[in-house]
Image (cartoon, rainbow, N blue to C red):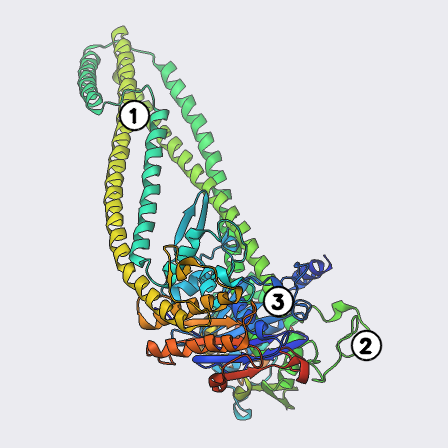
Amino acid sequence: MGSLIIKRVRYEGDHYVYESPELNSGINIIIGDNGSGKSTFTYLIEYCLGGYLKYFNVDNKTEKYIEIVSDTNNYAEIEVLLNGELYGFKRFIGGNVVYVNSGEEYNSFPIYRQQLEGTVESEIFSDWMLDKLSITKQELNLGTKTWKLNINDLLRLIIYDQDTPSKKIYKEPTNLNFVTDSLLIRKTIFEVLLGISSDEYFRKFEEFKNIEILRDKEHLKIEAFNERYSGIDLDIEKIEKDLTSQNIELETLYNQRDLFLSSNKKVDKKTHLISEIQEQIIQDEIELSTISLNIQANQIEFEKISKYFQAQTSEINEIEKIIFTNEKLNLFSFRLCPFCMNEHDPKENHCLCGAEIKDEDYEKFIYSSKEYENILKHKKKSLETIQTALDSYSSDINKGILKRDYIQSKIKDATEKLKALINSTDVNKNNEAIDHLHAEILELMKRIESYSYRRKIAIEKQKLEENFKKVTETYKTIKTELDDLQKIFDKNNREIISNFNSIYHDLITKSSADANAAEINEDYMPIIDQGIYKNKSAGVPVRLIYYYTILALAIKYKTVKHPRLLIIDTPEDSGIDDDNLKNDLLLLQKVLSNVNADSESYQVILTTGLEKYPSEFGPYIIERFNKKDEGKFILNEK
Amino acid sequence: MNNTKQEAKKRLMFIQKEDYNFLTYHILILLKILGATSIESKFQDYKKIAYLIQFLSTKPRFNEYSKVELSQAYNRSHLKKQLISHLVLILKNKNYIGVHFNLQRNSLDIWLIEENIPESFFDTSLFVREIDNTKILKSELPRLKVLTLKTMVDTIFTKNNIITWEV
């Protein structure tokens, strides 16, 4: 199981800046009044973990976070301990790439799977994170849609947000639709986080799916083959038999001809046949040289383009280094003149030194990280085009070589034939019988060739059928194994679920929900007092304790995949009164002590109102905003 | 719309081999590997760098270049001289390097001020190739730090039959 602890949160743009104090493992509390930036704090974390935030989207018409959306060159950055190792995750606002800095390495990952299409890369940020957290990347099929597990999905049970109505429990997905909010997906998220969907089972499932595809492919191959050669008798035994008898016949004819040749003395004129073959050879030679020239030309082009490809690849590497240098050394800031090192007030259409200018005097030299990123993106795109060109040349070359080899062998055969003919003419004396024999031999050879071809096809067919049989057998074995695994894991899951129920029940009865019984149903949704309606504010403890319970199970069981990070953003909504809220928040301490939680092993980040936390939590406060009275807002103007 | 226009424009203007950051990391690595880290062990005559960048960023063994490639490298180096002189000023202002005026050669000597370079700049696997190239170049050009510009140009270019002119 992996662990994820947030150490620091940062924001920087041309106008605003924020840097949090260092966060601890264990409980962290951020307090503030309305609109002072408590939620922004959690948004910045979510954004760096690859989440989608409508508030940070420029195109969002109604709910833009205006300070951030209108800022420029801005990014969010978090420092995290991932399995005890320090990483920095950085993401430009509006950008779809997460830059991961591990101290030694500096990588960038796209956020969305579509960004991978046609690129050389194969991993998105989520894949990388799930790998680090030892979570198998699962794929589910819903009707015609395929859904791949994303770190974003898991955040739905890690971040308790305020936008989702409490009774829905799971944080609402980015693009709410029937697939993303389907029961199957919600169940999968729960199962994955609690480790009750075994990796082994899903690996087997994936294996099963792959073999299924392979089996279908093999089947298609056989069908295509049969269609292509329909009507041809491909009984291999019969073909072999015929071939043998024909070869014997050929042998006899040769012997006969030799006999005639040695006994006949008359002069023969075979010039006609010879000149025909010569003509053919000349034509083939001409074609051969054309093809060879073509191949050569293509090869030269190919060489050129692959050199260009290499140059382009190394340029891309260099830009990555440029970006790194730019960020580390920050040679240019738009407020500081690089030559006199004086601050200046950037004025539109004015030079660094204040004189009026044309932009082009200096903009060539000064690039922001975002602009570098943009350049990098385009270079990568052009790499794809070059790759396409390379592929097409290489395919042309291969085709040419095939054709060349064919013609070469044709010429060789014809030359041999010609030689034999010329040699034989020396001794050969004209004879009707010999001509007749030749014709017969030729005819027979043609037949033998056609039979050989048929034999080749027949062998191919046999091979295809054998393959199909083998794949089908593997398919059956894997299916049985999968079924067995499914049974085992259904059984194992019962223990964790019953543990979930016992913790959940225990906490709910002590909470403000005023309930006597609680458990989760087969869809993992809470059932309180056998399903009797509670007032709306009871939704808060019902949901909050659901998250607590998952955290507790993650601490208790090594098999649970939940990274033991819980982010609770302002739970006081839904009209819950302050005393009840404090009581419910305190239950967190109770559940943690019940599972003997070592505060090094987990992290809870709770944002709440200025007075809306139990006094016992006082020592955990690490950050305080107060916009109304003290004007302390999360983002500070530069 | 305006935004994308601006982006495209900047993209088109971008010349990788003349980018300040590109030149910067090469210079810093060069100084670091050559051990030019104090006034006593300074790198004499910064103009030499303009000729070296090509070899540091691609193939360091200049004797393996073809005549055409080498003469192209020579010509381009002249264009880089001015950029690098600006850059030296910027790096000095940022306190990343120290600069000393060399009266004898009528040029600037420079050295790296290592404590001002952000930690972790050099400990990254990112620059492995550049560092290796620098080491190779260092072995191909003995006494590179104190070599005069003319001797260096002679070794790299004139000896390989490239026509050079007064530098």
Residue at 42% x, 76% y: name it. Answer: A587
Give neighbour class at mark 1: few <14, some 14-19, many 20+ (Cα, 10 Å): few
Mark nearer the viewer, 2 or 1: 2
User: Chain for mark 1?
Assistant: A
Q: Is residue B10 above or below residue A220?
A: below
Q: How dense is the environment of label 2, judged by Cα within 10 Å: few (below 14), some, or many (20 and up)?
A: few
Up-down: is A392 above or below B87? above
Q: Nearer the viewer, mark 3 or mark 2?
A: 3
Question: The residue under label 3 is which amino acid type?
Answer: Lys
The reply to the same-chain question for discs 2 and 1 is: yes
Determine whether, in the image, residue A82 is placed left or right of residue B55.
left
Chain containing the residue with disc 3: A
Give the residue furthest to the right: A356
Picture quadrant where residue B90 is located: bottom right
Describe the element under mark 1 as helix, strand or loop: helix
Observer able to see residue B163: no
**Percent coordinates x, y for residue A299 in the rendering:** 48, 46
Residue tagged by mark 2?
A355
Q: Which residue is mark 1?
A: A453
In this view, the residue in front, A449 or A177, is A177
Disc with the residue nearer the chain's start (2 vs 1): 2
Examine the rendering and report whether any part of residue A345 can be seen: yes
In what quadrant of the picture does the C terminus of chain A appear?
bottom right
User: From mark 3 to mark 2, how far is it between C-alphas?
Assistant: 26 Å
Secondary structure under tag 2 reads: loop
- Residue of label 3: A370
Which numbered disc, 3 or 2, marks the residue that appears first in the sequence? 2
For the point 82% across and 74% down, which residue is it? A356
